[in-house]
Image: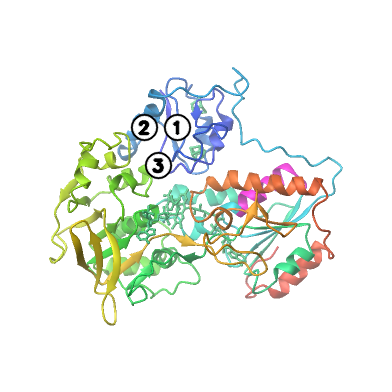
Amino acid sequence: MTYAITQTCCSDATCVAVCPVNCIHPTPQERAFGSTEMLHIDPATCIDCGACADACPVDAIFPVDSLPVAQQEYATINAAYYADQTLEPAPDGPNFHAWDEPVFPRVLPSDFAPLKVAVVGTGPAGMYAVQDLLLHTSAEVTLIDRLPVTGGLVRFGVAPDHPATRKVGDTFARFHTHPRVRMHLGLDVGADVTAQELAAHHDAVIYAVGASADRTLAVPGEELPGSISARDFVAWYNGHPDAAPDAIDLSSERVVVVGNGNVALDVARILLADPDSLARTDIADHALQALRAGKVREVVLLGRRGPEDAAYTKSELLALKHVPGLELVVDDHDPRTAPAIDETDPKADPKGRAALLRGVTRDRIDWAQAPAPGRRIVLRFHSAPVEMVGEEAVQGVRVVEASGERTIRTDMVLRAIGYRGVPVAGLPFDETTGTVPHEGGRVAGRPGTYVVGWIKRGPSGGIGANRTCAAETVTTLLADAVAGALPAPGRAQKAFHRLARRRARGSSAPSR
Ligand SMILES: Cc1cc2nc3c(=O)[nH]c(=O)nc-3n(C[C@H](O)[C@H](O)[C@H](O)COP(=O)(O)OP(=O)(O)OC[C@H]3O[C@@H](n4cnc5c(N)ncnc54)[C@H](O)[C@@H]3O)c2cc1C
Ligand SMILES: NC(=O)c1ccc[n+]([C@@H]2O[C@H](COP(=O)([O-])OP(=O)(O)OC[C@H]3O[C@@H](n4cnc5c(N)ncnc54)[C@H](OP(=O)(O)O)[C@@H]3O)[C@@H](O)[C@H]2O)c1
Ligand code: SF4
Ligand code: SF4
């Protein structure tokens, strides 16, 4: 018997360090790390000890003989990763612990005074940075979030029907009450305190503020009522404090989603999920009521490229194929789609993304008709939106495709084309990428100021990707500290806590 890694893996590599026989790959030291969508267990060498399953923060690891039906293909997926490749040799030969955590040397001398570090943002990037500082240095941390609750996108992004993934928040929460952490919630840096005030009270400040705006399509009609960003829709069903409970009207039978990344799959799944199963999750009550009363039964996902270039991860698409009562259909309108899926196209990759759609129903859909009976998700590739059609509200989406243009009738369009970072007052900003320019996490031209997570790398990558990202930023910060390159703060960290308590929004905002 062996263990297998499954759908919810966020590639944070926690399991790698605990495996006694180095059978989980790719490790952070291997070239493939960061380019595979998940890690895999080698069934040939796994000794069935269960240590990885105990360590995984998102419950992604199971013995293969206890995998639920919908996850059984992960036994094959894990094994297939090893079937056709030679692993890189471990760095120190046959030493069982040669594969380890990402190697970022911690260089602070033991007599170094505890650093006073402010971390802005309690999402994954901020919390991996805090975790790293607390576990590897004696730093005293001021932890800040503009919202009255912690978690960032773990709480307000990750879909409610992914409870195992949301559980990673419990791992982070252990550090909120650490004796060397003082947390201030409901405190917006830029509005309630300035970047200068923060810098004046700390040796270093790490910004982990994520990406809180949307990419835009820049097509006519994008601002019409009924054209909604997926970010707003996600915030609404997750009960984000900025989202009005009545913000979403679900009276359209058909919803068109622009984009086919994982966010597009999340919103499509939630729109069509059985409300009784959602009732067992922590979806916002107002969203559950609206979904129960709503009329949506068909969601069309528009991909501007082909199935081989879809942006979703394989595991999320596989999961969609197993949702009870939900049909997955590929619109067969483009002559390139079927050959890519069936691999009759000589350029098709038999292990690629398009091959995942083998066996999925293909249909030539008549968009002038009302949606077919039942609940279904239609994947429509080679289809780029050029206009939201309508006078006072959206009535359709005009798309260009190989055969010309066509309008898909709908009263609701969700734009799931990616998030975008917003400028942080007092920090430089690259308008093209929506990120803060940096070198190894150090903000260009701002000694003592650092970035991590989506505001550093842009809005892509799962939760685990922020762990290596945080390790790089913390390493740069510590090297600067040792080099004497951190500007001396003029004021005490304690004085900041008094200031923060006065400025935090709402008397109920917990500061400790
Ligand atoms: C809809 C959605 C679903 C996702 N689902 C998954 C999933 O299932 N699995 C997975 O692995 N990955 C998932 N991801 C990706 C994952 O959420 C991101 O990789 C991760 O959250 C990025 O972390 P971050 O800390 O950079 O940003 P965030 O998580 O956005 O955290 C930023 C924090 O900074 C705070 N902040 C912002 N501005 C200020 C300010 N001025 N002052 C104070 N605080 C501020 C915010 O309130 C927030 O708490 C999902 C992403 C999205 C968008
Ligand atoms: N379950 C999970 O693990 C989970 C869930 C949600 C999010 N996440 C992660 O969070 C990150 C962000 O996800 P995301 O879905 O927001 O972004 P994404 O993966 O970058 O997908 C964006 C989608 O929008 C399309 N797009 C962009 N601009 C467009 C335009 N002008 N016109 C038409 N289509 C356009 C892209 O098409 P092109 O590919 O052609 O550019 C792509 O299909 C990803 O790393 C994702 O994996 C993970
Ligand atoms: S989430 Fe982390 S610990 Fe869990 S399987 Fe994936 S890499 Fe391993
Ligand atoms: S069960 Fe044990 S041996 Fe197998 S992958 Fe997990 S930690 Fe390694």
Q: Decide: few, some or many residues near mark 1? Use Cα within 10 Å; few <14, some 14-19, many ≥20.
A: many
Residue under pointer 1: 40
Residue under pointer 2: 77
**21 part of magenta stretch:** no
Does the image show residue 377? yes
Residue 450 in the figure: left or right of residue 466: right
Residue type (three-letter) at the residue carrying disc 1: His
Q: Decide: few, some or many residues near mark 3? Use Cα within 10 Å; few <14, some 14-19, many ≥20.
A: many
Residue type (three-letter) at the residue carrying disc 2: Ile
The reply to whether callout 1 and callout 2 are in contact (CB within 8 Å) is yes
Write the residue at 47% across / 24% down.
48
For residue 7, the mark is 3
Picture coordinates of residue 349, whole percent (x, y) = 30, 36
Q: In this view, does 443 lie above or below 82?
A: below
Q: Which secondary structure is most common in the magenta stretch?
A: helix
Q: In this view, does 380 lie above or below 213?
A: above
**133 part of magenta stretch:** yes
Nearer to us: label 2 or label 3: 2
**Mark 2 secondary-structure assignment:** helix
Q: In this view, does 15 lie above or below 250?
A: above
Asked whether 485 or 107 is in front, the reply is: 485
Residue range corresponding to the magenta coloring:
126-138
Q: How far apart are marks 1 and 2 (CA)?
A: 8 Å
Picture coordinates of residue 55, whole percent (x, y) = 55, 37
Does the image show residue 358? no
Q: Quick one: which residue is furthest to the bottom in this view? A: 392
**Mark 1 secondary-structure assignment:** strand
Q: Earlier in the sequence, mark 1 or mark 2?
A: 1
Residue type (three-letter) at the residue carrying disc 3: Gln
